[in-house]
């Protein structure tokens, strides 16, 4: 009997001593052993950036699917189950198909060192190559230039969402260095949609694109997006679109929608596809209101929200989103990883939240202990304490503020744990 996907994934964890080791040699070797599935994919749209990759990809997918296209999609990390990372022609990969493709990759790798992300990305590419679809959406895991997804010689289109500071230990200390890594997905002659950027990031992206003869479709140049009277207004050289606001909450989603629409317009899609991009996209744990489940019942009548953002730009976007919500006292439950800029993330939130309860992230080796997160929160002006877990934190908040808005935030790993706990 073949081992299940969880067992094979655990074995894959042990193939390399590091979680992240940015080189592509191991990926190329394994792809060659599998007869180069990356060369047999339906047309690829490759998405990189610091924030907004997942939301932008979800909007592009919603737009493509509106017209009847079958779309493969690869994303990471997953929240509750690994299967979320690989969507075959619109459906999450089945346990049977995932187990089979993981087993083939594990066998072909022959015990050689390879990181978990690398070998599971190859498994996704193999699954995509062997299933019929009209498009393949690939979301970069980390950076771009040396990311395991960056193996497609000629994608149909590349997309770079806003670049900001995150993962500096791997990508460089400055915006220019990080932008250089993200711009590594740009391919010779292949158009690249670019979301809003800091000037120093844009300079690098323009330099790389210029050297490769890759036309840019950039925010503020080739396309514009804004809001007027509770509508999204998008304009490019082919005309103007007047659309509903995105279903995904937050002002930053206006820019993500603009990039998605620019991609869809380049691909020849019509206004109905662009409207579907903003009204039909679903992307969990991005300022998502939870509406059912045991944690929601525990919090009632308080509102329970979930967000997985974890860097300073995400903190700013989240604070701005909270400002746009109807007035209600907001209390945070926060857990973070020790690779993150805790103060940078929490500083903007201190202006919009009444208090913070810190938790350690269950089963995450890199979690910051709750008391350390609380100490950092207090330093930026938040009233902060700790709780043993999310359920206990909800209980503490509802005792003092039964009609609060409770926002669980700080990490996609914490978000995934909450989704699993709330599903029981």
Image: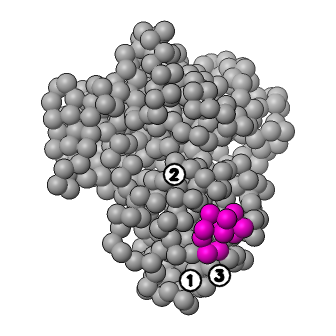
Q: Nearer the viewer, mark 3 or mark 2?
A: 2
| Mark earlier in primary sequence (3, 2) | 2
Residue 274 point in image, percent of width and height: 24, 40
Residue 2 point in image, percent of width and height: 72, 47
Nearer the observer, 410 or 127: 410
The residue positioned 65% from the left and 74% from the top of the image is 384
Can residue 95 be seen here? The reply is no
Look at the numbered discs 1 and 3 and tell me whether their residues touch, using CB distance below 8 Å.
no
Is 252 placed above or below 134 here?
A: below
Can residue 410 be seen here? The reply is yes
Residue beneath label 1, please?
Answer: 397
| Mark earlier in primary sequence (1, 3) | 3
Residue 392 numbered tag: 3
Residue beneath label 2, please?
Answer: 314
Classify 10 Å Cα crowding around label 3: few (below 14), some (14-19), many (20 and above).
some
Circle 1 SS class: helix
Which span is picked out in magenta? 374-384
Q: Quick check: 20 left or right of 93?
A: right
Nearer the observer, 306 or 79: 306
Give the CA separation, mark 3 to mark 2: 26 Å
Residue 20 point in image, percent of width and height: 73, 37
Circle 2 SS class: helix
The residue positioned 77% from the left and 44% from the top of the image is 13
Circle 3 SS class: helix
Is 241 placed above or below 246 here?
A: above
């Amino acid at each position: 009997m073949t081992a299940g996907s969880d067992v094979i994934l655990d074995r894959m964890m042990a193939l390399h001593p590091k979680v992240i080791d940015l080189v592509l040699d191991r990926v190329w070797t394994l792809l060659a052993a599998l007869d180069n599935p990356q060369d047999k994919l339906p047309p690829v749209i490759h998405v990189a950036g610091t924030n907004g990759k997942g939301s932008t990809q979800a909007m592009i997918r919603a737009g493509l699917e509106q017209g009847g296209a079958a779309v493969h999609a690869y994303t990471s990390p997953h929240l509750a189950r690994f299967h979320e990372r690989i969507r075959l022609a619109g459906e999450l990969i089945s346990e049977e198909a995932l187990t089979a493709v993981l087993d083939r990759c594990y066998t072909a790798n022959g015990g050689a060192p390879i990181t978990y992300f690398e070998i599971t990305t190859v498994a996704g590419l193999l699954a995509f190559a062997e299933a019929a679809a009209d498009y393949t959406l690939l979301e970069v895991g980390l950076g771009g230039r040396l990311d395991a997804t960056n193996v497609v010689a000629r994608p149909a289109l590349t997309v770079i969402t806003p670049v900001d500071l995150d993962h500096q230990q791997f990508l460089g200390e400055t915006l220019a260095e990080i932008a250089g890594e993200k711009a590594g997905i740009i391919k010779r002659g292949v158009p690249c949609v670019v979301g809003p950027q800091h000037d120093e990031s844009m300079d690098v992206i323009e330099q790389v694109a210029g050297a490769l003869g890759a036309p840019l479709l950039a925010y503020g140049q080739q396309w514009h997006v804004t809001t007027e009277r509770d509508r999204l207004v998008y304009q490019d050289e082919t005309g103007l679109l007047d659309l509903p606001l995105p279903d995904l909450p937050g002002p930053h989603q206006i820019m993500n929608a603009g990039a998605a629409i620019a991609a869809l317009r380049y691909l020849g899609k019509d206004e109905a596809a662009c409207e579907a991009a903003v009204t039909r996209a679903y992307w969990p744990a991005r300022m998502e209101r939870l509406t059912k489940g045991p944690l929601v019942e525990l919090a009632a009548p308080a509102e329970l929200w979930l967000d997985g953002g974890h860097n300073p730009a995400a903190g700013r976007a989240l604070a701005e989103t909270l400002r746009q919500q109807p007035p209600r006292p907001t209390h945070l439950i926060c857990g973070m990883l020790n690779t993150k800029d805790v103060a940078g993330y929490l500083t903007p939130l201190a202006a919009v939240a009444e208090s913070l309860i810190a938790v350690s992230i269950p089963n995450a080796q890199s979690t910051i202990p709750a008391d350390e997160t609380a100490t950092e929160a207090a330093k930026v002006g938040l009233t902060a304490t700790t709780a043993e877990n999310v359920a206990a934190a909800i209980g503490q908040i509802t005792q003092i503020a039964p009609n609060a808005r409770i926002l669980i935030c700080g990490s996609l790993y914490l978000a995934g744990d909450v989704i699993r706990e709330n599903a029981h």
